[in-house]
Amino acid sequence: MNTISELMTHDHRDCDGIFARAEELASDGDWADAAEALKKFADALNAHFDAEESTLFPAFEQATGMTQGPTMVMRHEHQNMRDTLAALQYALDKQDADDFAGEAETLLIMMQQHNMKEESVIYPMLDSRLPGDEQERLSASVGKHLGEARAA
């Protein structure tokens, strides 16, 4: 059985790889392929956020009783990253390499800090607080959601 930590940390790394490809293509001035890669990244990132917000965070809140704590902060950070992603898309649409690089750097820092919090707090608490069968159910549901999003 994959733990929630393993599943979601792996998905963080997948998203990072897709993002790096979009950055590389934009840096090379390959705007058409950069646009395709950025769309793929946006889809993956939004699927990841959706899985957390609709499935994992409610499970965390139920298991811990904390509804105004870590998950509230994570949801707020998700929105900030969505806003930065929109600015990144705008820079790509303008084919502005400098703006794209700046927004990409901002988003990368935000993702690194955010992922560290999830990987060191949220996911381990889910792994330790949920019964094994609930972990398996959540992992299967989230894994299916993420897989479907990648296949679309």
Image (cartoon, grey):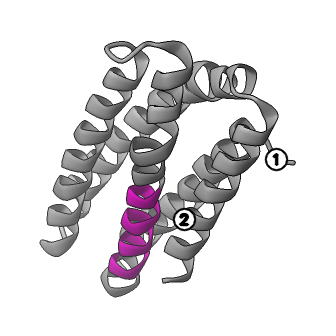
Q: Secondary structure at mark 2?
A: helix
Q: Which residue is mark 2?
A: 145
Q: Position of residue 21 (x, y in %)?
A: 52, 67
Query: How far separated are the C-alphas under marks 1 and 2?
Result: 15 Å
Q: Position of residue 137 (x, y in %)?
A: 69, 50
Q: Which residues are drawn in magenta?
A: 35-47
Residue ID at (52%, 39%): 56
Q: Which residue is mark 1?
A: 2
Mark 1: give few (<14), some (14-19) or many (20+) Cα within 10 Å.
few
Disc number at residue 28?
A: none
Q: Quadrant of residue 35?
A: bottom left
Q: Position of residue 1 (x, y in %)?
A: 87, 48
Vertical arrangement, residue 111 with respect to residue 130, above or below: below
Q: Magenta span has 37?
A: yes
Q: Secondary structure at mark 1?
A: loop
Name the amino acid, label 2: His
Residue 134 seen in render: yes
Of labels 1 and 2, earlier in sequence is 1
**Residue at the right extreme, as displayed:** 1
Name the amino acid, label 1: Asn
Q: Specify whether 108 is left or right of 127.
A: left
| Residues at marks 1 and 2 touching, judged by CB atoms closer than 8 Å | no
Residue 117 seen in render: no
The majority secondary structure of the magenta stretch comes to helix
Q: Specify whether 36 is left or right of 127.
A: left
Q: Specify whether 117 is left or right of 45.
A: right
